[in-house]
Image (tube, helix red, strand yellow):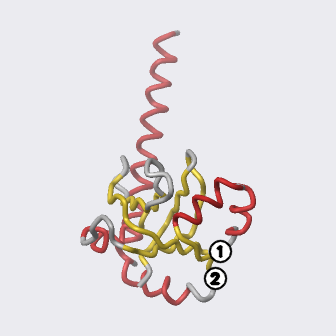
Amino acid sequence: MKKFIKWIFYIFIALMVLGYIVGKNDKSEAGATSSSASVADTQESVPQKEVFTTSARQLFKAYEENEVATDENMKGKLVAVRGVVQSIDKDFTDSIIIGLQTDNQFMPARMEMENSEKATAAAMKKGQQVTVICKKMIRVMGAPSGRDCLFAK
């Protein structure tokens, strides 16, 4: 009986990993086929959706003061965050992560960039001033974290 449960567990884990890989590939293929169109569409769609504009430092302070109010203020809006680049990294899924300086040097605002922004991220330097536009903003472990972000042109 223990072997049977063990095999079920291994199959379950294998299916989860397979699903993650297939989902990631579908997302990257969709991004690759429409990368030039998505940049143009995003630039055109920015005026269609309200934009919440802030700096990384202001966003960090707002989350420190009241996370609920900050999330409500940004709900349903694109979030434009300007700041100084503290780090240019990748995470375990190979996603591009741009860290923007906040008042806490150990907790930068982490912006997960779209794959179409790889060339721009590769040309960046620490200390550079940038503005990113994110479709979603949340607070993770005390620091702002943006998802589906593009560099403002």
Q: Report if the CB atoms under discs 1 and 2 are less than 8 Å apart.
A: yes
Q: Which residue is mark 1?
A: 77
Q: CA distance from mark 1 to mark 2?
A: 6 Å
**Picture disc at residue 2:** none
User: What residue type is disc 1 on?
Assistant: Lys
Residue at 37% in and 60% down:
86
| Label 2 Cα crowd, 10 Å radius (few <14 / some 14-19 / many 20+) | few
Residue 153 in the image, given as x and y percentages of width and height: 41, 85
Going from N to C along the chain, the mark reached first, 1 or 2, is: 2
Residue at 24% in and 72% down:
123
Residue 111 in the image, given as x and y percentages of width and height: 46, 62
Residue at 41% in and 56% down:
24
Depth check: give the residue in front, 5 or 25. 25
Residue 117 location, quadrant: bottom left
Q: Which residue is mark 2?
A: 49
User: What residue type is disc 2 on?
Assistant: Lys
Residue 141 in the image, given as x and y percentages of width and height: 56, 45
| Label 1 Cα crowd, 10 Å radius (few <14 / some 14-19 / many 20+) | some
Q: Is residue 51 above or below residue 143?
A: below
Residue 136 in the image, given as x and y percentages of width and height: 58, 65
Q: Is residue 53 above or below residue 26?
A: below
Relative placement, left or right, of 90 versus 50 is: left
Number of callouts: 2
